[in-house]
């Protein structure tokens, strides 16, 4: 496995090269060998390293499996981190868990991808994070991601503006005013929920900003379970009004606890700022748009469910089947359409979401 | 449909109702409904055949399921059922026609709304017959908002009503507009004196916010039903039939009904274990697929299915039986909860069925039907405990999909929720023994 991890790390290096398909098949063989629940899952489908000839034939695990079982190739090893999916009140045992024996591969995937997609052409920038740091939320992959981003790319003046006591809106305001005074661009990072919270606070005080040229905003995650639902384009327009940003300066990142690599809007690389936007990832992650039951690729342009194959998931399972629907784009990226859970049910039998909301139950 | 169009339609319906339906004797209404329903019980009736042709295409349900399910439901609205419905709720049904003595010194009559607006659901074909029949029995005009998923049945049945009695049909309309078009819904609700709504929490709350205070609002939200299987139904000579009944209840309407069971509590200690019962239920679902193939799933339904199944496939101790069109999960954890539907059931072992009431209690607000395969003498105690925690219907396993009319849907009366009572008090007669008079 160590040699394989070295090959994956080499593939992730900006100067590195490799064959995704060959690495994926080798990784599948290694995971089949070591990850017992996954091995059983594959055997039930008649898929083994001997029968799978192409990476597209590797069985992806439904992400719900991360809630039920410890999906790791190293059940007896120590862990650098256990990232958990956000849960409501159902108790920690019902949250999806992604165990990472070490984080160097995770970070090696994160850094060059962030540089290309969020900060192209800039070594660093003042980064204002509307989210807690890793120190406050040790089980959050997002908190880790943001902590690494600030560590690697944060210019002096960067910081986290949510802690155990909540959003420090006055500190954010002061930092933004400082950036205006210094004429120094800033990169705002956080969840839509945090931004909306801050913008509501600003609206009550009639505050708005005109951030210096080169500033940008990156948000990630949706509104699931929150009181308000906003379309990405509307959210983008709102950010624009409040911070003085053009749509081309607003980027959405799509990541999952069950993955080790992120996708971004390709807005800064292509200049395509209109919606719906295309999400792309680096060479070491591939996405198939499939029929969730047959796992056959849907016709180009058709809607299907996203299955991601991430070499960064070296220690768990490289292929995961999400609940997100989307369609493939010509450049190998995809357009994200939504979460399966948001679909209105056909029946009058209680919809899962409604039940969970009402009973505060597991998800 | 625009708000103005709906308003015009609603006022026309109300006026037609004042002119005709309000004066039609209740027994005549029953006659007309019975005549309409009777036509639909003739297999060669052209409009029924049209429904049988269109509904499978529109809903995806198996043609045989549509044919049998529709017939089974509609035949429960013949004269004797409608009379029973009246008799159940009104000691004297003639109060719908005029004033009748109530008790000493009173006469009383029941008045229905001028117009009832109904937000209909599309999950089960012909289900709108229930609100339509009840509304007409209350001498109210009916304005039904069709569901996008099933806009077929209502208009066809309405045509039959027009064949039987054009004046009565002129008090009924089915219309379609998107649920998101709140201005149109608001216009319909504004013109109505009673509102019925079927749907999810979001739909119901959205309609509720439009209904003024004092207007009856009858809401039928999402529900979860389940089965209870006693060890006596797991005898070697009974277990296969029991599993067949469980599978049939779950497969009917692809589990989209509020009456559809999602979880079966199976008592341990029978000749057939809960785990073996799961296998029998799987085999029964597989047999049903041949005659009643499941509707094709949307991508998102498929995704929900795969995630639901995937989780149990990785859960320690759980066993997943999966076919092309059905899934049975045998899970040692008896925690109550819904499945992803579309013929997906959980089988959970319990030491004794008397523990089930406690297990389902957290879902109190969602509970509806319980299908029981138990000996007759166990039923009263079981029914008491289930009724106490929110179950509103207890029926034999195998009959869950076909509630008997008159059915008190979600525990509510059919007619009396729509009615308003008017009393006439007689003059107080002088008391000859009262010296002060």
Image (cartoon, rainbow, N blue to C red):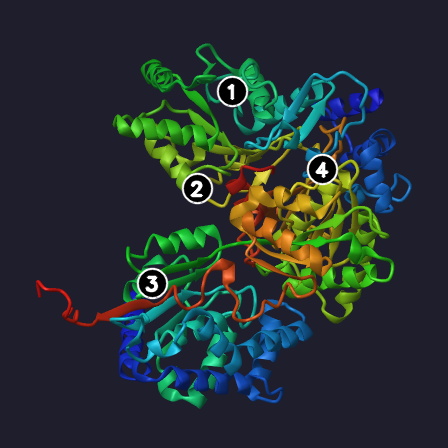
Image quarter in which the N terminus of chain A is found: top right
Mark 3–mark 4 distance (CA, rounded to whole Å): 44 Å
Q: Is residue A330 left or right of residue A18?
A: left
- Do callouts 2 and 3 point to residues on the same chain? no
Q: Which residue is mark 3?
A: B184
What residue lies at 79% left-to-right and 35% top-to-bottom?
A24
Question: Circle 3 — which element?
Answer: helix
Residue A85 vertical position relative to residue B371 in the rendered view, above or below:
above
Chain letter of the residue beneath label 3 in the structure image: B
Q: Earlier in the sequence, mark 1 or mark 4?
A: 4
Where residue B32 sits: x, y (%)? 44, 86
Where residue A7 sits: x, y (%)? 79, 24
Where residue A339 sits: x, y (%)? 56, 44
Which circle, 2 or 4, is nearer the viewer? 4
Q: Which residue is mark 2?
A: A229
State yes or no: discs 1 and 3 in contact (Cβ < 8 Å): no
Q: Residues within 10 Å of mark 3 (few under 14, many from 20)?
A: many
Frontmost residue, A261 versus A14: A261
Mark 1–mark 2 distance (CA, rounded to whole Å): 33 Å
Which circle, 1 or 3, is nearer the viewer? 3
Mark 2–mark 3 distance (CA, rounded to whole Å): 23 Å
Q: Which residue is mark 4?
A: A65
What residue lies at 8% left-to-right and 66% top-to-bottom?
B437
Question: Among all residues in the image, which is located at the extreme top?
Answer: A156
- The label number, if any, that marks residue A122 in the structure image: 1
């Amino acid at each position: 496995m160590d040699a394989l991890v070295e090959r994956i790390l080499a593939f992730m290096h900006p100067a590195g090269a490799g064959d995704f398909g060959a690495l994926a098949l080798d990784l599948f063989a290694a995971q089949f060998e070591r990850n017992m629940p996954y091995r059983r899952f594959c055997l039930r489908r008649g898929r083994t390293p001997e029968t799978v000839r192409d990476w597209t034939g590797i069985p992806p695990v439904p992400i719900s499996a991360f809630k039920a079982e410890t999906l790791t190739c190293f059940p007896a090893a120590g862990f650098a981190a256990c990232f958990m999916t956000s849960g409501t009140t159902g108790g920690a045992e019902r949250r999806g868990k992604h165990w990472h024996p070490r984080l160097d591969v995770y970070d090696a995937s994160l850094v060059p991808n962030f540089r290309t997609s969020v900060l192209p052409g800039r070594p660093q920038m003042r980064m204002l994070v509307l989210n807690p740091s890793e120190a406050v939320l040790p089980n959050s992959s997002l908190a880790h991601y943001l902590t690494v981003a600030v560590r690697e790319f944060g210019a002096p003046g960067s910081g986290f503006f949510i802690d155990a006591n909540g959003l420090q809106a006055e500190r954010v305001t002061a930092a933004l005013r400082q950036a205006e005074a210094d004429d120094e661009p800033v990169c705002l990072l956080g969840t839509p929920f945090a931004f909306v919270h801050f913008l509501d606070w600003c609206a009550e005080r009639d505050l708005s900003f005109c951030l210096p040229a080169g500033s940008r905003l990156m948000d990630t995650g949706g509104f699931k379970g929150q009181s308000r639902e906003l379309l990405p384009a509307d959210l983008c327009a709102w950010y624009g009004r409040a911070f003085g940003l053009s749509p081309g300066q607003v980027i959405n990142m799509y990541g999952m606890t069950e993955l080790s690599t992120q996708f971004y809007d390709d807005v800064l690389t292509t200049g395509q700022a209109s919606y719906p936007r295309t999400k792309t990832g680096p060479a070491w992650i591939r996405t198939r748009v499939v029929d969730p039951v047959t796992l056959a690729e849907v016709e180009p342009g058709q809607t299907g469910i996203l299955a991601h194959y991430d070499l960064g998931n070296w220690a768990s399972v490289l292929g995961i089947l999400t609940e997100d629907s989307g369609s493939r784009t010509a450049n190998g990226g995809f357009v994200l359409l939504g979460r399966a859970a948001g679909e209105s049910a056909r029946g009058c039998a209680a919809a899962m979401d409604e039940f969970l909301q009402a009973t505060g139950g597991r998800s | 449909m625009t708000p103005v169009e709906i308003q015009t339609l609603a006022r026309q319906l109300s006026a037609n109702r004042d002119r005709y339906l309000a004066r039609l004797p209740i027994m005549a209404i029953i006659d007309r409904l019975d005549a309409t329903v009777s036509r639909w019980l003739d297999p060669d009736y052209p409009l029924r055949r049209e429904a049988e042709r269109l509904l499978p295409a529109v809903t995806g349900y198996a043609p045989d399921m549509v044919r049998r399910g529709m017939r089974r439901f509609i035949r429960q609205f013949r004269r004797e059922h409608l009379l029973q419905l009246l008799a159940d709720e009104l000691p004297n049904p003639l109060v719908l026609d005029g004033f009748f003595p109530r008790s000493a010194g009173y006469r009383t009559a029941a008045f229905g709304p001028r117009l009832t607006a109904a937000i209909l659901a599309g999950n089960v074909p012909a289900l709108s017959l229930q609100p339509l029949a009840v509304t007409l029995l209350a001498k109210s005009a009916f304005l039904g908002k069709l569901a996008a998923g099933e806009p077929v049945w209502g208009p066809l049945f309405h045509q039959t009503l027009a064949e039987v009695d054009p004046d009565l049909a002129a008090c009924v309309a089915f219309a379609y507009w998107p649920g998101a078009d709140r201005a149109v819904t608001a216009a319909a609700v504004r013109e109505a004196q009673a509102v019925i709504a079927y749907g999810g929490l979001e739909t119901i709350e959205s309609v509720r916010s439009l209904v003024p205070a004092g207007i009856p609002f009858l809401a039928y939200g999402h529900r979860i039903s389940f089965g209870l299987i006693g060890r006596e139904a797991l005898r070697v000579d009974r277990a296969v039939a029991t599993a067949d009944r469980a599978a049939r209840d779950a497969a009917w309407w692809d589990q989209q009904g509020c009456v559809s069971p999602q979880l079966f509590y199976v008592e341990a200690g029978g000749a057939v274990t809960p785990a073996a019962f799961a296998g029998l239920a799987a085999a029964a679902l597989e047999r049903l697929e041949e005659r009643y193939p499941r509707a094709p799933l949307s991508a998102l339904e498929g995704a929900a299915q795969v995630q639901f199944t995937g989780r149990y496939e990785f859960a320690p101790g759980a066993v997943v039986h999966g076919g092309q069109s059905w899934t049975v999960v045998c899970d040692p954890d008896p925690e109550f909860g819904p499945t992803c539907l579309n013929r997906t059931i959980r089988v959970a072992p319990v030491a004794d069925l008397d523990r089930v009431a406690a297990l389902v209690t957290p879902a109190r607000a969602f509970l509806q039907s319980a299908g029981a395969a138990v000996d007759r003498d166990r039923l009263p105690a079981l029914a008491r405990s289930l009724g106490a925690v929110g179950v509103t219907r207890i029926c034999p396993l195998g009959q869950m999909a076909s509630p008997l009319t008159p059915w008190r849907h979600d525990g509510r009366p059919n007619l009396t929720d729509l009615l308003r009572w008017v009393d006439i008090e007689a003059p107080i007669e002088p008391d000859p023994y009262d010296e002060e008079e």
